[in-house]
Amino acid sequence: DIQLTQSPSTLSASVGDRVTITCRASQSITYWLAWYQQKPGKAPKLLIYKASTLENGVPPRFSGSGSGTEFTLAISSLQPDDFATYYCQQYKTYPLTFGGGTKVEIK
Amino acid sequence: QVQLVQSGGEVKKPGATVKVSCKASGYILNNYGIDWVRQAPGQGLEWMGGISAFNGNTNYAQKFQDRVTMTTDTSTGMVSMELRSLRSDDTAVYYCARGVVVVPGVILDFWGQGTLVTVSS
């Protein structure tokens, strides 16, 4: 199985900050990576797929980059609605696997 | 609009079987799959498997291969996931999600609200 390692596991930031989250894969997944946002008690929401393609309706302050084994999710100017946990997911091979999550909390 | 509405929470004893259902609406069911993802309390996301609504083909994670069955009824839009021989570490929120085939794999673009399954003696 492909392992995904996210860092950091927790991130403290303020409204307006630029934040980045890293997802490293145990082997190359080309660009077959998605990012999800999850708020407490809610289902995950798809943000980005194919490493950098924004899902419809997702604000442009979110962006994704990377290929191979290293990927980044960036939020250009953190908004109050963005405090949540973020997960990466690879779909290069089955089983689909997720990273351990990064919690973005208020500083 | 796309909606996935799941059945209510369940409390089961160890060794029992649980069946969670997911009613899909607002899109052409045959064009997508439904995948199941679970989340233990305070933990991350774990993919269990998926089913094609087009032909009923399933793809299960090896971890659940012997204990899970996923079925679909396209006439009603109902998809179900049955997990047998429950253990305490199966306590989790179980989500269904619409699977969009983006070869080589699947992304999950709409999710149900989740169903809490508690396994306790």
Image (tube, helix red, strand yellow):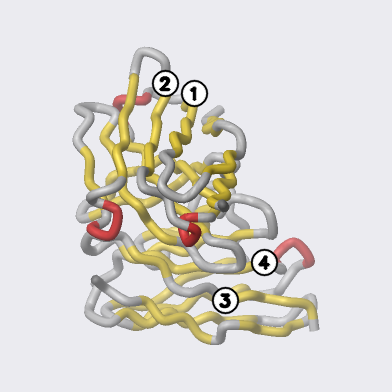
Q: Which residue is mark 3?
A: A102
Observer-side mark, 2 or 4, equals 2
Where residue A91 appears, as percent x and y from the top left, is: 29, 60
Where residue A18 appears, as percent x and y from the top left, is: 66, 81
Q: Which residue is mark 1?
A: B25
- The answer to which of A54 and B18 lies nearer the viewer is B18
What is the spatial separation of the Cα atoms under label 1 and label 2, in whole angstroms?
Answer: 7 Å
Chain of residue at mark 2:
B
Q: Which residue is mark 2?
A: B77
Same chain, labels 2 and 4: no
Amino acid marked by disc 3 = Thr
Residue plotted at (47% across, 31% down): B21
Circles 1 and 2, Cβ within 8 Å, touching? The answer is: yes
Circles 4 and 3, Cβ within 8 Å, touching? The answer is: no
Please tell me in which quadrant of the rendered image residue A2 appears: bottom left
What is the spatial separation of the Cα atoms under label 1 and label 4, in whole angstroms?
Answer: 28 Å
Circles 2 and 4, Cβ within 8 Å, touching? The answer is: no
What is the spatial separation of the Cα atoms under label 2 and label 4, in whole angstroms?
Answer: 31 Å
Chain of residue at mark 1:
B
Q: Which residue is mark 4?
A: A84
Q: Which circle's residue, 1 or 2, is located before the other in the chain?
A: 1
